[in-house]
Every structure is written in C-alpha cells, then in structure tokens.
Amino acid sequence: MSGYKIIAIGAEKTGKTQLLRRIVSNNFSETYNPSMGMDFYSLKKNNDSLQLWDISGDSKTLGMALPFFRHADLGLYCVDLSNPTLFQKEYLESFKTHNPDKKIILVGTKMDLLADTLEEQTAKAQEILNNIEGSFATRIAVSAKHNTNIESFKNLLFNNTLSDKFDVALSKLPIESGLYLALKQLLEKVKDTPHEKYEPVAAISLELVDNLLSNISSDKKQEAIEQFTKKCAPYFENEHPHVMKAVFGVAAVAFVTLLATTIGLGLGLWSGPGAIATALAAGTTTFLAASSSFGIYTKKISFFKEIDASQEIENVAQCADRFLNENRLS
C-alpha cells in the first residue's frame, strides 16, 4: 500500500479538524475543541492511503509543529470564509520552505455561513477565494457542517497526491502553447472527478502529448488525436458532458498544433490565434482543426462531427489563416 502525507494548516477556528473528520468518518460536531499540537487521521482508497496531519493553528506552537512539515506530499491551507482575514502567512511559508516543489490547495471552510442558498454561497465563496493572494494548485469552498463539496474535496486530495500524469504532460509543453492551455482547461474540468476517472484520462492525455512530440508520421498523429477522444469518452460522455467538451477542445487544438508544425512552425511558437485562446478561457470548444487549403480535411476526423458551430469555426479559420500566413517560414 502506498502512503501519502498531507499537512493541513491554517489559523485557529478555521474548521480544519471538523473538515478532516467529515472526510474520514463522515462526522461533524458543533463543539469546538482546539487541536493540541497535532492530530492524525487516515483516509484509504483501494491500495492508497492518505495520512492527514492536522496542525494546530496556535502560532505559539509553530516551533513544535515544524518537524511535522517535512516530507509532505501535499499541503492544505484552510481559511474561514466567514472571516478570511485570519491568515497565517508564517505557517504557509514554513510549509513551502520544507516542501518547495509540493502543491498547496486553498480550502475555504464554513461556506454555509455566507448566504442562505447554495448558489449564493458558491458565488460569494469563489469571490473570496479568488481574492486571496498566493500560488495554489487549486481553490475549493466546502462546508463540513452541511457536507457541501466534501466528495469533490476527497477527489482533489487523491488526484493531487498520487502520481499525476497531467503534470508530466504539461511539463513537456511550452507554457505559451495552445496545447498547454487546452490541457490546463481539461485539468480544471476533471480535477475533482473520482480518481478512477481522473487517473486514466491523465494517462491518455500524456499519451497524446508523447505521440505529438514523437517522430511518427502526421497521419499517425492524426490517428492519435482521434484515439484520444475515443479513449476519454467512456469515462465522461454520460455523466460529465462539460469534461467531454474540454476533451474535444484539446483534440481540436492538438489538430491545429499538428497543422502548424506540419508547415514549419515549432511547437513552442504555436500559441494559437487569439480567438482560440479566448474561446478556451470561456470554456468553448469550437476550434478549427484545419482548412482544406492545407490539404487536411476535418471530415476525416470524427470528433469534428460533435462540433456544430460552422460560423464560429469559419471565424476561427480566418484568424488561423492570418496567423499562419504571417508566421509561415520562408
């Protein structure tokens, strides 16, 4: 069995202990009992075990807590959404010092105190989380009391601690490239799905990137793009349509990337026309693969049958043509 160490930090009374108890044993108590130094919990799934270290938020115990920060696989920084000014920068910096390459998830607790309806709670929580400065792997709002987003939070823990092939795939791409942006968009959509779905799709994404970067023929690369959509479909097409839209977005941008490299542009130079980047940021997936003037026909690729947006494709086509003509190598 593989074990992973997760450190939960944050100010006093931010609800760290109640959150961990909720995800481990589905328990919640209204009674506040401050953690004395450190508490320990374990969360198991299949052959993997998450060791959850609940560090006291009392700043007087920071020196005593520091030895427990070492060799962590993931950090959880908890903020009380009803009082986000309680920010313990020294704990956050200490975690980064001991684990410079590890991810930290920003967790907004007590979202139930923000408003009466879940829709209002979610909107207010997202606004608060977005205004908190810092480099976090992701940000999520939860309510241990009402069990809100707890299952998604569990999925985040496993998806961010187990070997992450999404990270490997992204590390192989220039961060300014359209394909990097498309994969980041897919990661954003899939990050809180069950690990049984997340892990294989991460592996499929890495396989696609490896194929695109390899020396195989363009036809083989086109086939790899289509196989990418077919392999992802069984995991999401019925339950998570928003994820499948992101999958088709990756496939479309991958095809544009293939076109760009075919005519001589390096992968790092292809960031896609502005329309593609804008559409990605908005979560849209209607991207142009290629135009017949380059000898590549989208009708050959089945995933384009899923995209019913001819006018949008035409608009992106014009933008793509201008970009490619301006950057064509002589």
Image (spheres, grey):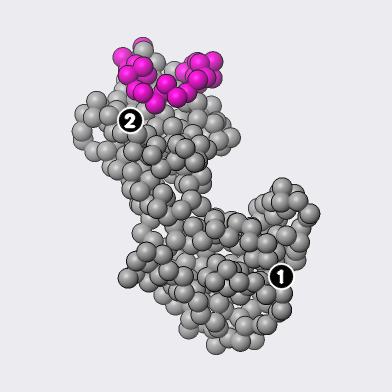
Rendered position, 91 above or below 182:
below
Q: Is residue 307 magenta?
A: yes
Magenta residues (range): 293-320
Q: Which residue is mark 2?
A: 226
Return the residue found at the far top.
Answer: 293
- Residue 43 makes an appearance in the image: yes
> Element at badge 2?
helix
Tell me, yes or no, if residue 93 can be seen here: no
Q: What is the x, y in percent for residue 270?
A: 40, 32
Residue shown at 34% from the left, 23% from the top: 301
Magenta-span inclusion, residue 282:
no
Quadrant where the N terminus is found in the figure: bottom left
Q: Which residue is mark 1?
A: 86
Frontmost residue, 259 versus 33: 33
Residue found 45% across the figure and 24% down from its top: 306
Q: Is residue 147 left or right of residue 68?
A: right
Residue 153: x and y in percent read 55, 59
